[in-house]
Image (spheres, grey):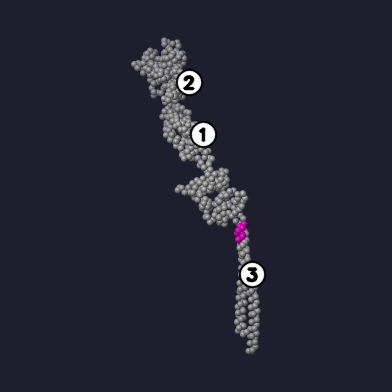
Amino acid sequence: MGMAAGQARLLSITARLTDNELRSQTITNSKLRLADQSSAASQEYMDALNTTQLMFGVYNDNGELSYQSLTANTLLTYSDLKNQYSLVNSSGQIMLNGSDIKKYEESNSLAEFLYSYGIPEVDNPKYSDALMGIYGKTTADDGSYLYENLYDETNPQQWNDYFSTMTEGDIANLQTIVNKNPEDVTEADAQQFTNTVNNWTSQVTGNVLLKEYANIGGTFGAYLNGMLDLPDVEFPDKNDPQFTDVSGDVELAEKFDLASKQCYDNCHPPYSGSGKNCYLHVLAYLLNYDGDLAAYPKTFNTTVEGLGISVEKGQITGAAIYSQREEYPVGSGNYVAAKDMMKEVSQYLWDPANGCMAPVDETDTTTYDSSVAEKLLSNYKWVDPDGDGVYEKTLKSWPERIIDTYYAVQNRDTLGLQYESLLPILDDFQTDMKNALSSEFNEDRYHEAVKDWQSEMGRWLKEIGDLKANYVESLGKIPDKTIPDETDSRYQWYVNLYYRMGGGATNADGTKNTNNYKELDENLINNAEWLQFALENGVLTMEQASYSENGSEKYPEIGTYDWLSIIYTNASDIKSQENERAIAVAEVKYKNAITEIENQDKKYDQDLKKLDSEHSALQTEYDSIKSVIDKNVERSFKAFS
């Protein structure tokens, strides 16, 4: 080989040796990086081994517990034997799927909401209980409950409207009487209460459904019977002795005593002349005597129908009263004609403005069927104010008592009366007359009694109002005739959900108020990783529907349940476990990575071995060529030296 060719070959080998060394260094570096990759793959695998996932416990139909990945769908979907939870965002809204929200917003009531989930509609046992609470448990002749005839489902206010029409005007008028000043209230006002209730009773008993009103119970019966139960409180009678103050020295009483004394004494034994008729003179002067003798004879009708008297002038002129004069005032030396004093007494008694009535007699036992004599001598009479044949016992006026007494004394033999039996009655008459003339009506006491009567009637009117209010209120509380089946296992779950969503609350425009809930993105409903992240990082929190004996303050209509906040790690149905899927994926990834690294490492080893062999061959060739060149150089130096 020529020297030049050898040098060229030597340079080529040197370049290849350098390249081999560079390639070897590169492969060695790559082998070092494979070690890093192996370490990284190992760490990733170790991390996967340490990861956990949230699992939710679910019972199957056999009561066997199994766990599945915790997703929003798993947590929120109903299942038997499952605790109820909700997911809550930072605004306090529960997160729901679109189906639940649609059903809620399309429902007009809790019942409609429950029906939308397939909960059956059944008869409501509280419906009949409520109606019996309103109309009582009375049954009709056919065995049906009375409320079945009284309650109209299409017009619940039927009877309220009926009674309101019947009573409103009357009650307003009665209330006016109650509110009057006591001094302005009259017996006619008091009678109006009785007449009003009688009219109501007539209308009620005239209705075939209400004929047996006394047996109707419940709030309706209480209202009806209370309305017809006028308090048994009599309007105060002005002639009741409790309103009379007797002074004993009133002028008229003294004049009557002086003027009638002689005739009164003569009618007692020993009789003077026709003594048994002497008291007729006293009575004759009390019978509207005005001093006009030309007016006689005078006739009067007794309180007993068909009986009358005729007072002859002789009963006036033949009396000691006619000519007698008495000292008045006693001890004054002034004498006054007895007939003038009797005239003054008579005119007082007959003046309607004075309202002189016979005294109340608590011992009187006369009846409508008593004898004529008993009726004439009684302080009471029997009248038929309405002309309906029903007679009422009422107090006589003083003029009526005088007329009846006159007839009894004058016709005692016909009536079968012994004069001696009349004397005590005449004594009482004399005493009663003096008391009546010496009495003063106590208006203040009477008006207080009227006020008490008004108070009692006012209490009754208020009671009617209260009973009516109770009845109307109970009508407003009648539950639905049919309801969702409360025994259905889904019932309480969706009741809880309904009230947590807002209980049907609406906005001013009638749309549902959406403040309590928000729709969950459908892509996240079944995403376990997202839910776990949201719970672990506080993006979402949880609430649990739990039994509460006292009910819920926030959701008062929910019943015996309440929604309470709960930390997800404290939920008995949620647990953490190794993430087997993540571990399996990491394991496959790790094995693949290690295999790839090992294969690459082997290839690098093969490449290094190949380079080493090539390097040795090149080095040998290099040394051989260099030796040849060195010998050629040496020979050349020897040839030219």
In the rendered view, would you say 174 is above or below 619? above
In the rendered view, would you say 80 is above or below 368? below
Q: Picture quarter containing residue 253?
A: top left
Q: 604 or 322: which is nearer to us?
A: 604
Which residue bears the numbered disc 3?
602
Query: Which residue occupies 63% across, 65% down?
Result: 594
Which residue bears the numbered disc 1?
142
Q: Amino acid at mark 3?
A: Lys
The residue range painted magenta reads 578-586
The numbered disc on residue 587 is: none
Q: Amino acid at mark 1?
A: Asp
Query: Which residue occupies 45% across, 14% down?
Result: 416
Secondary element at tag 3 = helix
Q: Earlier in the sequence, mark 1 or mark 2?
A: 1
Secondary element at tag 1 = loop
Q: Position of residue 576 (x, y in %)?
A: 61, 54
Residue furthest to the left in view is 294
Secondary element at tag 2 = loop
Q: Quick check: 525 left or right of 333? A: right
158 inside magenta stretch:
no
